Each structure stands twice: as C-alpha cells, then as structure tokens.
Image: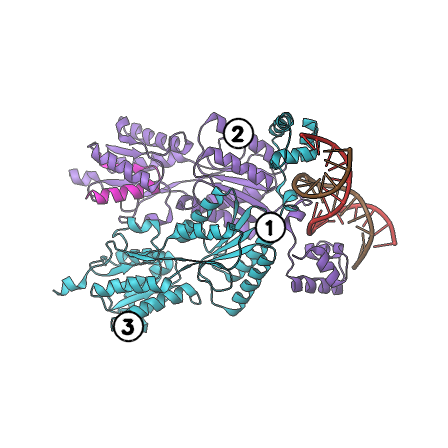
Chain colours: A purple, B cyan, C brown, D red
Amino acid sequence: VSTIRDVAREAGVSNATVSRVLNGNYPVAPETRERVLAAVKALGYVANAHARALIVRSTGTIGVIVHDIADPYFAEILRGVQQVCDEHKRLLVTCNSMREPGREISYIEMLRSQKVDAVVLAGGYVEDDEFLLALDEEARRLRSVGARLVLCGDRVVRADAVTLDNANGANLITLELLRAGHTRIAHISGPTHFSTTRHRQAGYTAALESYGVTPDPSLVIPGDFTRDGGYAACVKLLESGLDCTAIFAGNDQTAIGALSALRDAGASVPADMSLVGFGDIPISRDLSPALTTVRIPLGEIGRAAAKLALSPEDGERVVRLATEVVIRDSVASRRKVLA
Amino acid sequence: VSTIRDVAREAGVSNATVSRVLNGNYPVAPETRERVLAAVKALGYVANAHARALIVRSTGTIGVIVHDIADPYFAEILRGVQQVCDEHKRLLVTCNSMREPGREISYIEMLRSQKVDAVVLAGGYVEDDEFLLALDEEARRLRSVGARLVLCGDRVVRADAVTLDNANGANLITLELLRAGHTRIAHISGPTHFSTTRHRQAGYTAALESYGVTPDPSLVIPGDFTRDGGYAACVKLLESGLDCTAIFAGNDQTAIGALSALRDAGASVPADMSLVGFGDIPISRDLSPALTTVRIPLGEIGRAAAKLALSPEDGERVVRLATEVVIRDSVASRRKVLA
DNA sequence: CTGAAAGCGCTAACAA
DNA sequence: TTGTTAGCGCTTTCAG
C-alpha cells in the first residue's frame, strides 16, 4: 500500500518530483531521477490510476460491449480491438450484454462513470424506439465529455461507425445458390428486431426476386444466431416436410447447428442439401464439408472500431467494410444433377 | 459533465445528501429523495467512479488475463467469469497476454494500479523461475492491499486456484485409445515450459507404460495449442512416414488443425487414423467426425475462479475440478480390424 | 531543476 | 434528517 509520498520519502525528494519522473514530461536531474526510480522499484509502487484519473482528462481506457464473449464472431472482433488497444497501451474493459438491449444501456452508463475514452458497441442493434432513443442520448453524453461511441454493424444512431453491407453479402451468397441451380432456398434468420437480421433477409429476398423466383415466406424459419437455435430451426425445417434443396443460415453459428442437425438426420451436405452461412468465423473452413459463406473481416472491424475509438478527432466518421463470398465445399450444383 | 454539486444545486440540497440518496445507506426523507432522483435523471448524472474509488475500499472491478480472447478455450472460461461478475454487479476488465509471460506481469501491475479487487490469471503458466518469482511477488502485493490473485490451471505460486488434473485426463484418454487396440499413438504436445503441456504429456506416457508399450519419443511432435500449430504438426507427422494409428492432440484446437490436415491429405478419420483432443470446447461435437476428447468444465472453471475472486475470505483456497472422457466418433477400434 | 500548495469529485465523520 | 468539512492520491500551477 505505498503511495507517492512513500516513494518521495524513500528517495528524499518531494512528491511532485516523483510525479515528474514517472510521467517523464518535465526536466528532472538525472541523479535525482535514478534515486526515484530505485525507490519505485524497491517499493513495487504503481500510481493509483483513480487519483490520476481525477485530474488527467484521459484514463486511457476504452470499453467494449459485445453480445456474447464466447461467440467466435464477437471474439474475433474483440481480438481486433484488443490488438489496437495493446499497440496504444490502452486498457480494455469488456462487457457482455447477452443480447439484452437494456443491459447495453446500463453498461454504457457504467463505462461512462469509469470515464472511458470511448465505448465500442459491437453487434446488431435492436430496432426499438425506446432503445434507440436511450442509445442516442448516451452517445450525446459521451460526446459532451469528449468521449466517443463507436458502433459496429449498422449505424443506427448518430455516432462513429464501422459498417458492413449485410444486404449485399446476403444477396451475393443467395445468388451463388441460385446460380448453382437451387430455387427452393430456405433461410434461417436471426433474432427479430435486429437490423442485421432484417438486412440479411432483405438481401436474400432481393436475390430470389432478381432471379425471378417468388420468395416463399414459409421457407424462412426464425432463428436466433446461436448454434442451438440453428439446430432447432433446421430440425423444424426438416420435420415440416418443406421441399428445399439449400439453406442459407443467417450466420455461421446457425449454419454449424444446421449442419449437425442435418448430419443427425442422416442427410448429407451438400449431396442432399446445400448449406451456406454468413460471417466466416475461423472454424468455418474446418467443418466437414468446409462451409461456403460470406466473409466478414471480423478482425478488421475490431481494429477499425478501436482506431476510431482512439482517434481524438470527432465528427461521426463511418468506415465501410466489404464482404465477399468465399466458396468452399458445402454447395452442390443442381444443374449437374439435372443433366 | 455534471458533478454531484450540480445535482445538489438542481435538487436544492447539499452534495452529502445526494451521495446518501445514491448509496442508499443512510436515512433520507422520502420527499428529498424524490427530488434528488429527479435531478439525477434530468442531468443524466453518474458518479465519477474514480473519485469514489479514492475513498471506498472496493472498486467492484475484477481483472482477468487470458492468453487469447478468441480461443474458445479461454472464451468459455471468460464467459463463466462474466456470468458471476454480472450476478454480483461487478465490472470485468479483460486483458490478452498473447501467451507472453512478461505481458502477464505488466497486466497484473496495470490492474493493481486500477485497484481491482482481484485478478484472475487464466491459462497455463510458463515454468520459468524469473516469471514465477515475479508472479509470486505480484500475488504478495495484491494480498497486501486486500486483493487476490486467482490461478486457473496449475497452482504454480501461493495463491487461490482452480485446478484441473491434466495428467489424469490425458491418462484416461490415452487409455481409451489403448483399449481400442492402438499402440502406435502420436502426441502433438503444447508450448514448451508450460505446466499444462508437461502434465498432459506425462499422463500420456504413463498410460502407455501402464499398458506395457514403451513410449517412442519420435512420436511426440511439438505443437503450440493453436489450430495452425496442430495442422502443421500433423503434416509433419504424416510426412515423416511414422507409422501410427492414432493421434492424441494436446488440446482441441490442435485436434481441429490435425483433423483438417488429415482431410487435406486424404486420410479418413477414424478409418485411417483415430484422433482425440483435450478440452471439449463447444465446437468439438459439431466436427465431422464428432471429436472424442477430455471434457474440461470450462464455464465452471470461470465461475469458480470468479467466486474465489469475489469472496473476501483469504487463505489460498484450491478448488479441484474433475475431467472426464467424452466418447464421440473420432476413434476406431483396431481390434475389429484385426478380427 | 525542485518544492509548496491547490484542488479533481466524492464519501464519511462530525455537527446541527 | 441534513449540512459542513476534511481528506483519498495524484498532477500541476506558481514560486523559488
């Protein structure tokens, strides 16, 4: 429990001198400097970050709120954020909202009380007026103390953002299925009220229409972006007896669940059923069959978000990241079958 | 940027009264209370956590250091820690050491300056004297300010710990392979100098010997506990032309890499090669074939560690968690083949 | 180059 | 029940 005073006494100087040595932003005699450093090491002294934060404007801390830390999607984003934070010697505070919008607001408030330099909100946002209003208000308050809110995904309120063209990605991957000759394509969607869910479904529908196939509402099964949700949705799809030859899962976790459901049902992928996902989380390539999916530059999202969070200039910047289809082995061509 | 004084002025009371309303640990007239609460809401006031931390003993924050946030192994532990922290309304600060011991020490120091109530060190520890000495010193310092260090894995220094019988788990899974008739069993191990690596390898060797098969050093290939490391090690194993019928991967990530290497080499699992892992991360059951592995109660480790971190009573407590073999589809019986 | 002193925003005695 | 006041440990003018 040693304070700056203890170090000062040990080194035979004033506490102001110790402070100057530690912060290195002021001239100090080399010899004095040595003595102070020796005292610091001897006592294992580290400055009280809170006392410091009371004075200095920046705490060097940034907060990030994710839906679920153990979901590879967020884990990869988080790793990107961490990377940039480490490079800049910033501390990262992680919070799990478990997909509860109310908790996200509470966390922002908590982070605000911690005087973080910025908060990164990673993940889809529920499209609910009350939530959006509260979020906007928090963004405003953060701004009023020189801090920032950075959104990842869709820019639902006025704030810095790293965005993704979810609709386009969904369009492209659906087109891939269409091009392979599939017309009865099921879609396991995400949680309702999430902008991500809506955009991906929109891209799917648009692709269908652009190919002249009328979207069949009974082919879109609600999911929740989790592995178990994907499994359950796929079981439901199979039991319903709906005839489809391909499934577009709303995200990779959902695809993983669907893949296992298919396997458990004795259906072979892609021979009996083609399957695609969205996200390209690392495990996708190691699945059997390796998953054809939409690549989201997850790490890049995190890095870009962290850079926005750390750069002091204000003004609602938007970084737009591209998605691309990555073809692997989970789609079979129906043309060949027909030929 | 409103302070407690602004709220006090707005409500027409003193700052002490505001403090009492907010902390709710002192009698305040209901009518006054209402006025204060109204002012708080109107101003969007949240107390400055740092000013508070300067006075109150506990900051309600706990820090956790993991090797890699995006590794499912640590992500699951982290989720457990988060869960308990949420239940107790504690803030969690997450740090990534990227497997660098030096960085772990730096992080503990940083967390100490943040006056966290405890730091949880999740993951294997390098068995290096300098590191261990530094770690022990940090544990002592943490203790001296009423904080705690909680270890997950092996109890390498005097501190609270959640331990795991790695040797036993490795022994059991190797026995499983032996029982299926395999005698030429390769082992892809972990990073050198990690206690976890050593213990798992020891369990493997012991199992072999208990079955009367002499361990062949050329069958243990160094790995690094990552997917790519597992892939590379497996390729090396295949190229070396060593005859083995089964592989015990040091952890599941390694097994995933090995599985892909095997697939890419055209070898079928388990028909051509049996494969087992260690950890039972969630994805293990979704692999093809589903992976036979050693189950580690990852979430439970996190929860137990968090509980130790939050419980004030001191005194180097050790929570011992059990591992168990979970049989899935990646091991083939060689007896049948011979029969 | 170094020291003395003010004060960051809050809580906790101590008074009233 | 409420207000006044003394710090928590640090940084930062302002003197010297």
Say left or right for A221 vs A72. left
Residue B108 position (above or below residue A221): below
Q: Label 2 amino acid?
A: Ala
Q: Which mark is residue A134?
A: 2
Q: CA distance from mark 2 to mark 1?
A: 29 Å
Quadrant of the image occupied by residue A279 = top left
Secondary structure under the numbered disc 3 in the rendered image? helix
Residue A154 seen in this snapshot: no
Nearer mark to the viewer, of 2 and 1: 1
Q: Residue at x 61, y 29 (%)?
A: B37
- Residue A138 falls inside the magenta stretch: no
| Residues tagged by mark 3 and mark 2 found on one chain of the structure | no
Numbered range of the magenta stretch: A244-267
Say which chain tag 1 marks.
B
Position of the N terminus of chain A by quadrant: bottom right
User: Mark 2, chain letter?
Assistant: A
In primary-sequence order, the first of circles 1 and 3 is: 1
The label number, if any, that marks residue B224 in the structure image: none
Q: Amino acid at mark 1?
A: Gln
Where does label 3 land, which residue? B209
- The answer to if A249 sits in the magenta stretch is yes
Position of residue A338 measured from the top left corner of the image (x, y, whole percent):
16, 37
User: Are callouts 2 and 1 both on one chain?
Assistant: no
Q: Quadrant of residue C1?
A: bottom right
Q: Could you tell me how far apart the alpha carbons at marks 1 and 3 are, in whole angstroms?
A: 50 Å
Residue annotated with mark 1: B114
Provide residue B228's location: percent of width, then percent of height: 37, 57
Q: Residues within 10 Å of mark 2 (few under 14, many from 20)?
A: few
A172 left or right of B16 in image: left
Q: Secondary structure at mark 2?
A: helix
Q: Residue at x 45, y 54 (%)?
A: B68
